[in-house]
Image: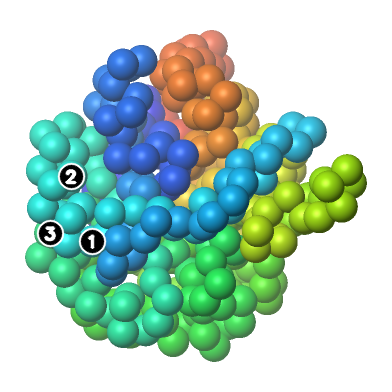
Amino acid sequence: MLKTELCGKTLKNPLIGASGTYGFGDVYEPFYDPDLLGAISTKGLTLHARAGNAGIRIHETPSGIMNSIGLENPGVEAFIRDILPEMRERETAILANLGGHSLEDYLVATEMLDEADIDMIELNISCPNVKSGGMAFGLRCEDAAWITEKVKEKTHHPVIVKLSPNGDGVAELAKACEAAGADGISLVNTFQALAIDVHKKEAVFDNIYAGLSGPAIFPIALRMVRDVARAVKVPVVGIGGIQSAEDVIAMIMAGAQAVEIGTMNLVDPTIMVKILDDLNAYMEEEGIDALDAVRGII
């Protein structure tokens, strides 16, 4: 009932562990088997290892969190050598989430990933928590299209472009990326936000701004996913504040092919399997044989 086609790959269900909050999947093994998921989007990778941002990295907000992790990761070479072999032992698809600070970084890393045993590249041009690159490529249509085209030239893997909600209208960004060769679109990444400690009289985060995620952003993310799904022909992966099977179904009704679940993994590390069980129950109760029966009906 839940089988999902995404960029030429068949996923056992539409649930994807979102980049960042799901790491490389191993941290959830004490709670359940990550093989139950349709796919895992890796911790955001960059060409070279990054220690991430200094100072506070996570700050709770009403119905959400703000984060300024700064793409802490082991680097693409170490990922391919040390982490990917263990991930590949699982029977779930792998999206290599790729960020960068320059075109050269993106392209060299893409060439390395092109030879790796992954299923797709999720091209992250939307991270608001780094001081260069990242979101800078995802704020304007011409820049988003340019980086998409250059990366596509370097790989045979499907490329899903992860969009920022902070720049040009997301539907226009999505259309620009599609025209440049994107095989899919994922959205939304976090919303740029600000937290101030009024007692210390300073910003909570060293970078001043940070990314807001969690249930608080779900209605906005849902609207943006619908806008993009109606604007492009390539598949759309819905992200942003999903906390229940009802939220997943809403994303699919808005046009999403699959979904990524992020922040709620930090609240309840078993949330993904709970949602999976509830999805199966919903399908049976509603007499729905396949998700395509309700996809894009709104």
In what quadrant of the picture does the C terminus appear?
Answer: top right
Instruction: Say whether disc 3 or disc 1 marks the residue closer to the N-terminus.
Output: 1
148 vs 210, left or right, is: left
- Work out how far the residue at label 1 is from the one at label 2, CA to CA, in angstroms: 10 Å
Q: Residues within 10 Å of mark 1 (few under 14, many from 20)?
A: many
In depth, the one of 235 and 45 nearer the eye is 45
Front tag of 3 and 1? 1
Asked if labels 3 and 2 touch by Cβ distance under 8 angstroms, the answer is: no
| Residue 202 image offset from top left, x and y in percent | 81, 55
Q: Residues within 10 Å of mark 2 (few under 14, many from 20)?
A: some
Residue type highlighted by circle 1: Val
Residue position marked by numbered label 3 in the rendering: 116
Label total for image: 3
Residue position marked by numbered label 1 in the rendering: 76
| Residue 127 image offset from top left, x and y in percent | 53, 63
- Work out how far the residue at label 2 is from the one at label 3, CA to CA, in angstroms: 12 Å
Residue position marked by numbered label 2 in the rendering: 83
Regarding mark 1 in the picture, which secondary structure is present there?
Answer: helix
